[in-house]
Amino acid sequence: SSGINAEWPLRPGSSQVCKMFLVRFCPHDLFTNTKADLGACKHETHDVKIREVYKTSTRYKRMGYEQTFLRTLEGIVDDMERKIRRQHERLEHDERYMKQEQARVDNIRQERLDNLTSEIDGLLEKVWLDTENVIELLALSYEVFQY
């Protein structure tokens, strides 16, 4: 006897039954509502009772479902690792760009600061010369008023 009665019209081998779920879980239930969402499973039946029937049947681990399950999970892991690697590369590129951009902005700032410093030094020198001229004029006017 297969262990299936009239209440269970589906058998573990039915095309409507998710074979991944029979093994352990349906990968389509992983990562729901994320960028890695696999979408809906094409098999509509995910029934724990059918899983128990499969696990107690003579077909358990003989149908290739476990190997398919493992290959599917390995494929998912490979895809995730590839996406992670791409994101790391993108992040490294963005970090390099940000460092270059920061260096460019720092150079512009330094150039402006150098120009302002030079301009201030020039104005201070002019003020100093003007002050020296004023002192000379005061000294001359002092001499003039002395006579």
Image (cartoon, rainbow, N blue to C red):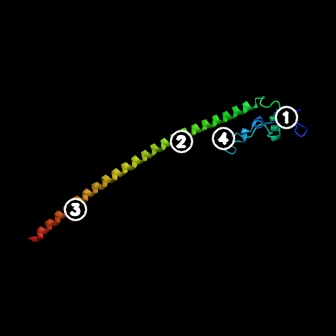
Give whichever of 47, 130 is nearer the camera: 47
Give whichever of 58, 88 is nearer the camera: 58
Q: How much space separates mark 2 and mark 1, taking CA atoms?
A: 49 Å
Q: How much space separates mark 1 and mark 3, taking CA atoms?
A: 105 Å
Which residue is drawn at the image coordinates 39% and 46% (left, top)?
Answer: 107
Which residue is drawn at the image coordinates 10% and 71% (left, top)?
Answer: 146
Answer few, some or many: residues within 10 Å of disc 4's Cα (few below 14, many 20 plus, some between 14 and 19): some
Which mark is first along the chain, 1 or 2?
A: 1
Of circles 2 and 1, the one toward us is: 1
Q: Which mark is residue 117?
A: none
Quadrant where the N terminus sits is: top right
Mark 2, residue position: 91
Mark 2: amino acid: Leu
Q: Which mark is residue 11?
A: 1
Mark 3, residue position: 131
Q: Secondary structure at mark 4?
A: loop
Q: Secondary structure at mark 3?
A: helix
Q: Mark 1 near mark 3, Cβ–Cβ under 8 Å?
A: no
Mark 3: amino acid: Thr
Q: How much space separates mark 4 and mark 1, taking CA atoms?
A: 31 Å
Give whichever of 17, 112 is nearer the camera: 17
Mark 4, residue position: 36
